[in-house]
Image: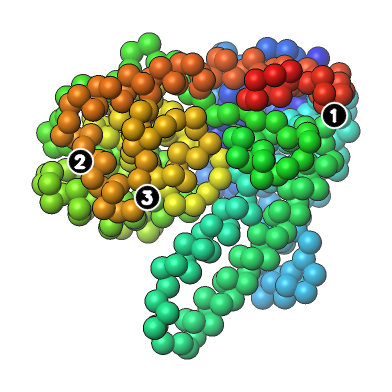
Amino acid sequence: MKILVVGGVLPWPEVSGLAIRLANVLRGLARVGDLDVFLVPGQDRWELPVIPPDVPVRRFHVVARPSGSFALPERLVWWLGGRLPSHFVGRDYREVQARFRAWTSERYDVVWFSTLRAYVPLKPVVDAPAIVDFDDLEDRKLIERLTLLNAARDPQAPGGLAAWRDVLVGMQARKNARLWRDLQRSAARSVEAAVVCSDLDRQYLGAPNVYVVPNGYAFQPHPVGREGVGLPPVIMLPGMFRYPPNADAACWLVGAIAPIVRRRVPHVQVRLVGLANERVQNLHRPPEVIVTGFVPDIRAELARADVIAVPIRYGGGTRIKILEGFAHRIPVVSTSKGAEGIDAVSGRELLIEDTPDAFADACVRLLTEPQSRRVMVEAAHALFREKYLWDRIHGEIARLAEAVARRAPFSQRLWIGAGYA
């Protein structure tokens, strides 16, 4: 079987949730076919990745995604009649499409699009049974962020230019959310299978051809989590802090949660581990707050973490960082939104709290109660091995690709994550 994978990020090195997911989609698909991989990443600095030996890619090509423009002329046209989200405005994909046509003239048995950002430019030039992996549902993310901003706004604040700017930002977010929702639904209708990370996202999309391929984590023969708490105690938040939900979580952790923790655990250190935007970089305040930037080996940071905090307040998909904690036997505290889509129970595999006081109390509990730590990491590790090993998920990805290539009726396909075929 010949399989084409079209992605919007580089899968290697595996330093972000989206890269980890794409890398493991490739491992799953490699079980059942020959892989051609065509990538259209953003124009940030990047180098051609080194393909690991466990992913036998036959052909590989990378073309930088064209930059967009949302200056006043484009913005006015978009407001008057834009049919795609603002992300696509001003991007000319003709060169990308021409490069793809020149790269291959083969016919494929199935094509896997990793995210809508890869689907939109190349679906028109690829003629094969198709799967699109949504990963995130962008409309949910936008509306949840807008709700969060509105809740934080002071109703007594004076009007003026700032107030009008907030109104325009809200209008733009709502229009973008509507356009993303329409795009998601039309994309799902146009392909043989749409893939999401959780059953909650499947229910939200509501289409009959939506399948759940959960996120996972690699088996760790030597988990780095430690039983005792270090000096200083460390609360770690890993992530790509150029991603707005992670940046918001970092600011909330440092500004609202950590000060409450320090009243009872005075020397606790917060470590924000991953590439950061300027807003998160400005949180760096040693020794209380360390912003590491990119780290080549996350295991070294995980080895010093006493709690993994996931104070996510908006967004879609599922958090690989939670599974990372489970796999390495490090206790986890999360918000309800952060733990969404993961089959874990608060008080058993992790602690879930949604206010700064309660979240801080949960961190303190896991820093000061050894028995609670031991019981929770054992339960979390057992859940991880039962449901979230990438090795098992690879098989589900392979079976879905085979079913789509055969164009089997949906009633005969494996419903991934739902427990029946």
SS under mark 2: helix
Residue 129 badge: 1
Q: Earlier in the sequence, mark 2 or mark 1?
A: 1
The residue identified by callout 3 is 354
In the image, taking residue 317 as reference, residue 395 lies left or right, namely right
For the question of whether residue 49 can be seen, the reply is no
Mark 2–mark 3 distance (CA, rounded to whole Å): 15 Å
Picture layout, residue 410 above or below residue 90: above
Q: Residue at x 78, y 17 (%)?
A: 402
Mark 3–mark 1 distance (CA, rounded to whole Å): 42 Å
For the question of whether residue 330 can be seen, the reply is yes
Mark 2 and mark 3 residues within 8 Å of each other at the beta carbon: no
Q: Amino acid at mark 2?
A: Val
Corner quadrant of residue 60: top right
SS under mark 1: loop
Classed neighbour count for the residue bearing mark 3: other residues with Cα under 10 Å, few (<14), some (14–19), many (≥20): some
Classed neighbour count for the residue bearing mark 2: other residues with Cα under 10 Å, few (<14), some (14–19), many (≥20): some
Which quarter of the figure is the N terminus placed in?
top right
In the image, taking residue 31 as reference, residue 409 lies left or right, namely right
